[in-house]
Amino acid sequence: MYRWDFTPVLANADLLAAGLVNTLKITGTSLACGLVLGLALALLRLSKHRWASWPAGFVIEVFRTTPPLVQLFWFFFALPLIVGIEMTPFMAAVVTFSIQSAAFFAEVFRAGIVSIERGQWDGARAIGMTHAQALRRIVLPQAVKRMIPAFMERTIELMKTTTLVATIAYADLLYAANEISQKTFRPLETFTVVALIYFVVITAFSLVARRLERRMAISGESTVH
Amino acid sequence: MTILKVSGLAKRFAGQEVLRGIDLDVTKGERIAVLGASGSGKSTLLRCLNFMEMPDAGTVTLDGRTIGRRESELTLVRQRIGMVFQQFNLFPHMTALGNVMEGLRTVRRMPRDQAQARAGKELARVGLADKAANYPAHLSGGQKQRVAIARALAMDPELLLFDEPTSALDPELVGEVLGVIRSLAEEGRTMLLVTHELGFAYHVATRVIFLADGTIHEQGTPDEVLKHPKKERTQSFLARHKEFSL
């Protein structure tokens, strides 16, 4: 019978903590960049002009259809050869996960924007708003509300996908786990603890996001039109 | 004094000609009721006047200036030509007051307290001062439409376009909206009104236009068009509105 012993793992709590901070750093940065870039991609994709919508559609498709690990390797190993700038693991990870999230978010934004009925655009334009004002003040606030569940889902997915950075030697939570398990010869305990950390962090995030969603639903209408 | 002049206005949707050469002069203080069977182009005509739809041909001249197609110009024109829709198109994420303030804040960049005071005045004018804090989801159809009218009025338009403002309302709510429109008429506001409320058109309009096949088929005073129509198509249209009581 295997005798579980967590003490050697817990003795390395500082390594785990540092790993978690790095995981959150990559997730947070990629999420922020991904949202901004995703909105930009969505707007380009929705443009009437083919020269704007086509390249945006291309980027979105490329990143949705290639494996994240391949993308990460490409940005870490191949891109520096092409453009001649050194990529740190952190930079490569943030670039990869930002664009990749942006590709997903772009589709979420696009679906959210087109789900807003024409009458809302009409109402906004009729009082003299520009297209940009109507988007910012009328359409996006309503669309974002509808998109929150999809954003949440994607953010959770992103946080789990960032474990891939361990493969390019970035000291995230999974990388710390590898290190600790090799040091302590306690892989079962180590990965159990790491799974627990992901579970707790992601569950906490979901709870906060869901509460936010509920609060937004309460302030004003959410489903009735 | 002519404030709006329309000439040769044409609009096609997917190869179908909806408007074919509309000429129309609107004089200050005029109240024009636009009638016609469904598909006759009434709504399209209205939507072309403030360029919610881009006309395919023809010109619209506001105060002697022909309106171009640039967004910066159209946003100015739309502030001067208010529009009220059949489906209200209120912003559901804003209160009644927020809806009325929105144009003042975002388009006019009016300071918050001023915009709030102005919006409150407009809501009071349509009898909804006590509903300022309500979201549209908590307003009746008639109240929503009155908020929409207040929202249009807040921009101080010289011309108001009503696109079937009571068609989406339950019958018992029609009166309150028509009452507001009538009070605007009594203030001497210039308006174009697409409606199926023939009785209202008769009493409130100064001119009635009957559209058919995308052209102005017949026009004149309410008495001429609604009581003594000369053209056969106008007559049969009016005959079909059995509930029509003058």
Image: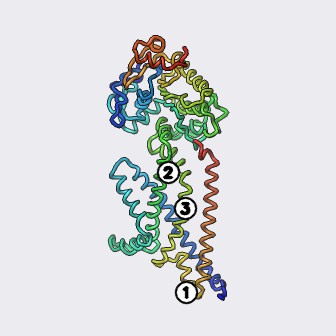
In the picture, residue B115 is in which quadrant?
top right
Residue at mark 1 shares a chain with residue at mark 3? yes
In the picture, residue A64 is in which quadrant?
bottom left
The residue tagged with tag 1: helix, strand or loop? helix
Looking at the rendered structure, the kind of residue marked 2 is Gly
Report the side of A169 relative to A14 (left or right).
Answer: left
In front of the other: label 1 or label 3? Answer: 3
Residue at mark 3 shares a chain with residue at mark 2? yes
Where is residue B134? Give x, y as percent.
64, 39
- Distance between mark 2 and mark 1 Cα atoms: 46 Å
Sequence-first tag of 1 and 3: 3
- The residue that mark 2 highlights is A112
Where is residue A122? Give x, y as percent.
47, 38
User: Disc 1 vs disc 3: Cβ atoms closer than 8 Å?
Assistant: no
Q: Nearer the viewer, residue B172 or A121?
A: B172
- The residue that mark 3 highlights is A153
Residue at mark 2 shares a chain with residue at mark 1? yes
Q: Residues within 10 Å of mark 2 (few under 14, many from 20)?
A: many
The residue tagged with tag 2: helix, strand or loop? helix
Q: Nearer the viewer, residue B133 or A201?
A: A201
Residue found 54% across the figure and 63% down from its top: A155
Report the side of A51 relative to B36 (left or right).
Answer: left
Report the side of B9 relative to B145 (left or right).
Answer: left
Any mark on residue A182, and which?
Answer: 1
Sequence-first tag of 3 and 2: 2
The chain under label 3 reads A
